[in-house]
Image: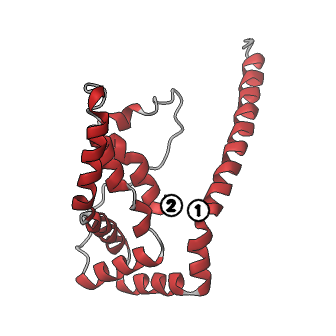
């Protein structure tokens, strides 16, 4: 599955949301020394997007590839729902798989709901002119190349960030150790 933009967050968070929400808060313990970060101001509700903005946003989702990044979400949720009964009923695994497979076509029509959610998010953030500009870009040769290679770029970038993060973490551990040593502590 291609995971891009809003799709990445949605796919990562979907199991936690479906499991009841509290799992999101439990994923990472609070850091004891959190650096202050700017928090968004409590903003007023944005105006409702126009019908044309929503139409353009749907076209954008198709052009930028994000609409297809959720192709496996519905089958995954159906499999997860059926699989939730396996532990209590291991003898029913084959039947549960068959039920999940038979339900998938019935719910595939709901894929449009996902697109509508994303389209509303884009339409709420971008004007008609901006959506048209984005569409122009994604329909251009360089825009199509961007969509085609985006996942590889992200994968390469994430590998690089992981390596950098590891080096940076070791550097910070050394610095903290040195600073604590200056204060008379050996850690």
Task: Identify the residue shown where x is 28% and y is 46%.
Answer: 98
132 versus 3 height, above or below: below
Q: Quadrant of residue 121?
A: bottom left
How far from the left and from the top, in percent, is residue 64? 48, 74
Say if mark 2 contacts mark 1, CB within 8 Å.
yes
- Dot 2 or dot 1: first in sequence order is 2
The residue labelled by disc 1 is 151
- Figure disc tally: 2
Task: Identify the residue shown where x is 26% and y is 25%.
Answer: 88
Query: Neighbour class for label 1 at 10 Å: few (<14), some, many (≥20)?
Result: some
Query: Neighbour class for label 2 at 10 Å: few (<14), some, many (≥20)?
Result: some
Left or right? Give the position of 168 relative to 143: right
How far from the left and from the top, in percent, is residue 187? 72, 14
Task: Identify the residue shown where x is 28% and y is 85%.
Answer: 52
Question: Which disc is residue 2 wearing?
Answer: 2
* Res 111 seen here: yes
Left or right? Give the position of 122 relative to 146: left
Q: Toward the viewer: 122 or 64?
A: 64
Question: Which element type, helix, strand or loop, lies under badge 2?
Answer: loop
158 versus 184 height, above or below: below
Q: Toward the viewer: 70 or 50?
A: 70
Question: Which element type, helix, strand or loop, lies under badge 1?
Answer: helix
* Res 41 seen here: no
How far from the left and from the top, in percent, is residue 118? 34, 66
User: How did the renderer colour the structure?
Assistant: secondary structure
Q: Toward the viewer: 111 or 55?
A: 111
Task: Identify the residue shown where x is 71% and y is 50%.
Answer: 160
How far from the left and from the top, in percent, is residue 125? 36, 71
70 versus 31 height, above or below: below
């Amino acid at each position: 599955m291609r995971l891009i933009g809003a799709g990445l967050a949605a796919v990562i968070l979907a199991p936690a949301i479906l499991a009841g929400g509290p799992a999101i808060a439990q994923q990472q313990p609070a850091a004891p020394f959190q650096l202050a970060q700017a928090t968004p101001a409590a903003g007023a509700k944005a105006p409702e997007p126009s019908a044309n903005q929503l139409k353009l946003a749907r076209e954008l989702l198709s052009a930028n590839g994000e609409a297809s990044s959720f192709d496996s979400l519905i089958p995954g949720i159906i499999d997860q729902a059926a699989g939730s009964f396996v532990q209590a009923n291991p003898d029913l695994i084959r039947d549960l798989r068959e039920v999940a497979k038979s339900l998938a076509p019935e719910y595939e029509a709901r894929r449009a709901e996902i697109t509508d959610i994303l389209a509303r998010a884009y339409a709420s953030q971008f004007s008609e002119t901006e959506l048209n500009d984005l569409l122009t870009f994604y329909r251009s040769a360089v825009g199509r190349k961007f969509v085609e290679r985006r996942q590889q770029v992200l994968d390469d970038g994430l590998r690089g960030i992981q390596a950098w993060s590891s080096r940076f973490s070791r550097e910070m551990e050394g610095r903290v150790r040195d600073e604590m040593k200056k204060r008379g502590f050996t850690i």
